[in-house]
Image (cartoon, rainbow, N blue to C red):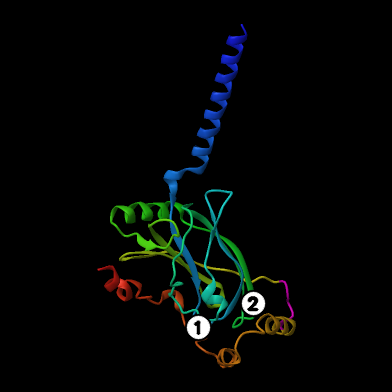
Amino acid sequence: MKFNFINKALTAISFALLIAILYNVMSYKSWDRYYYFSSVCTPESYPVILQDCYFITADKNELGTINKEDIFRNNSKWGEEYFFAEVQEPLRLPKQLVLEYVSYSDKKQYQDTIDLPQEKIKNIFIKADKKNQFEDMYNSSKEVKGLRFLVGIARNGNVIVWIRGKFLEEVLLKTKLNPKDEISNKENMSIEIEKIFKDLPNDIKIKVKSGWEKNANYLDSTTHYIELNKERWQ
């Protein structure tokens, strides 16, 4: 009788552990995870202060980081991603882009959570894997390959997102953000902007105030990404 009870208890524990393992496997979805590296760019003539810039993924417990190094250093150029693609763990694919920034040129603040075309992104990853279009990425423990996302922020709230790989560049979306309306007084906004951009080099400030590329339409310009990189892929 005691032996039967112990057997039943062990069976119940084993079953509970199995359920827990299956739940973790189904929640983690290793088959639906990829390596990818993300960065953000602006034109040289459009300095911004990034307050938020990251991806919300299909896993509610993780976020997709976006490298902001070139923006922080006022070293960004349109269509150019951060050079060192370092990744840690494979992630679920991004479903939304969270973006908040202040523009020196526009003297405005923009904020939005932007839906991404999830099905299109998934199909691109599947096709790129089959066509050997994944790029080498740095990982401290093993060799890994994946694709790159690049977020482009242009004048007047215009935003573009590219996905890239070997001989691969596609535009995922183009959208336009509306500025936040927190400071209605233009004079106060200008004073606040100067405080926020106190570390922006004076030569850049002077060029921006003189109308540097104020009519440039960057969203429709060509990045020449494939042309510039094809030699290293061949």
> Looking at the figure, which quarter contains the N terminus?
top right
Viewer-proximal residue among 56 and 146: 146
Dot 2 lies on which element?
strand
In space, the residues marked 1 and 2 are separated at their CA atoms by: 17 Å
Span highlighted in magenta in the image? 182-186
Question: Does the magenta stretch mainly form a helix, a strand or a loop?
Answer: loop
Label 1 sits on what residue type?
Glu
Label 2 sits on what residue type?
Lys
Viewer-proximal residue among 2 and 183: 2
Q: Which circle, 1 or 2, is nearer the viewer?
A: 1
Place of residue 179 in the rendered image (x, y in percent of width and height, measured from the top left): 63, 72
Place of residue 106 in the rendered image (x, y in percent of width and height, measured from the top left): 60, 81
Label 1 sits on residue? 44
Q: Is residue 138 above or below residue 50?
A: above
Q: Residue furthest left?
A: 234
Q: Residue at x 40, y 56 (%)?
A: 142
Viewer-proximal residue among 159 and 206: 206
Q: Residues within 10 Å of mark 1 (few under 14, many from 20)?
A: some
Place of residue 76 in the rendered image (x, y in percent of width and height, measured from the top left): 49, 79
User: Which badge, 1 or 2, is on the more N-terminal residue?
Assistant: 1
Q: Quadrant of residue 186?
A: bottom right
Q: Note whether residue 69 is visible.
A: yes
Label 2 sits on residue? 108
Judged left or right of residue 64, residue 229 is left
Q: Residues within 10 Å of mark 2 (few under 14, many from 20)?
A: many
